[in-house]
Image (cartoon, rainbow, N blue to C red):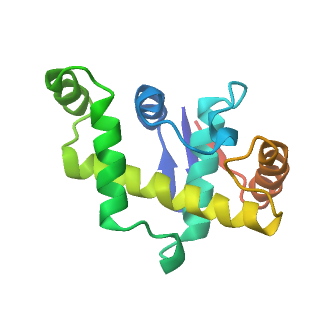
Amino acid sequence: MLYALQDRIITAGDLAFDVDLDPHDLSAIPALEAADYAAEQRIVDLTIIRALAGDTLIYRPSPEEVEARWERVRATWQRAEDFEAFLTRWGLDGDDLRGLLYSRMVSERYIRRVAATHDVPAENEDFAPIYQKWIAEVRAKSPPRRAP
C-alpha cells in the first residue's frame, strides 16, 4: 500500500512503524488519539499537515522539547534492551527517532495554531469535531494518490 502526497511517498512500512510507535508516543491532542481515527488516515493527515507547516519558525520545537519527547518515548519501554530492539527493528538510531518526533511535534504545533483560530485549545475534547471538519477540508485540497 503506497500513497503519494506531493513529493512524499507513504509506504506500508511507514504505516507499520507509526502503528508500532503510537502506543509509546501519545499525543496531547485528543483528536489525534481518537479510537476511530484510523492509523492509515492519521499518518496521511499528519504528512499533509507537516507539508503545510514547512520550515516556518513558529512550528519548530526547540531541541530541548524534542529531547524531552524522546526521553518520554524511551521511558515507555521497561527495559533499555526493548527500546534498542525497537530502534533496530526499524533501522533507526536515536537521532533518527528524534527527527521523526520533531516532525510529529511540528504537525502538532500547526494543529494547535488551527485550534487557536477557533478559540478552543487543541488539548480540549471539544476540538476533535473541529479538527475532523478542518482536516477533511485540507485533505480535499491535497488528496493523496493511492499508488498501485
Residue 120: which quarter of the image? bottom right
Which of 120 and 70 lies nearest the eye of the viewer? 120
109 vs 89, left or right, is right
Residue 43's x, y, as percent? 56, 42
Q: Residue lying furthest left in this view? A: 81
Task: Tell me if residue 109 comes above or below residue 148 in the rendering.
Answer: below
Residue 42: which quarter of the image? top right
Q: Residue at x 74, y 66 (%)?
A: 116
Residue 76's x, y, as percent? 33, 28
Tell how many labels: 0
Q: Residue lying furthest bottom in this view? A: 57
95 vs 73, left or right, is left
Residue 23's x, y, as percent? 46, 26
Q: Residue at x 61, y 64 (%)?
A: 110
Task: Tell me if residue 70 comes above or below residue 79 in the rendering.
Answer: below
Where the C terminus falls, by quadrant? top right
Where the N terminus falls, by quadrant? top right
Q: Residue at x 50, y 36 (%)?
A: 26
30 vs 86, left or right, is right
Q: Residue at x 30, y 65 (%)?
A: 63
Which of 44 and 57 lies nearest the eye of the viewer? 57
Examine the rendering and report whether any part of residue 6 can be seen. Answer: no
Which of 122 and 100 lies nearest the eye of the viewer? 122
Residue 24: which quarter of the image? top left
Residue 127's x, y, as percent? 79, 48
96 vs 106, left or right, is left
Task: Tell me if residue 120 comes above or below residue 71 in the rendering.
Answer: below
Examine the rendering and report whether any part of residue 120 can be seen. Answer: yes
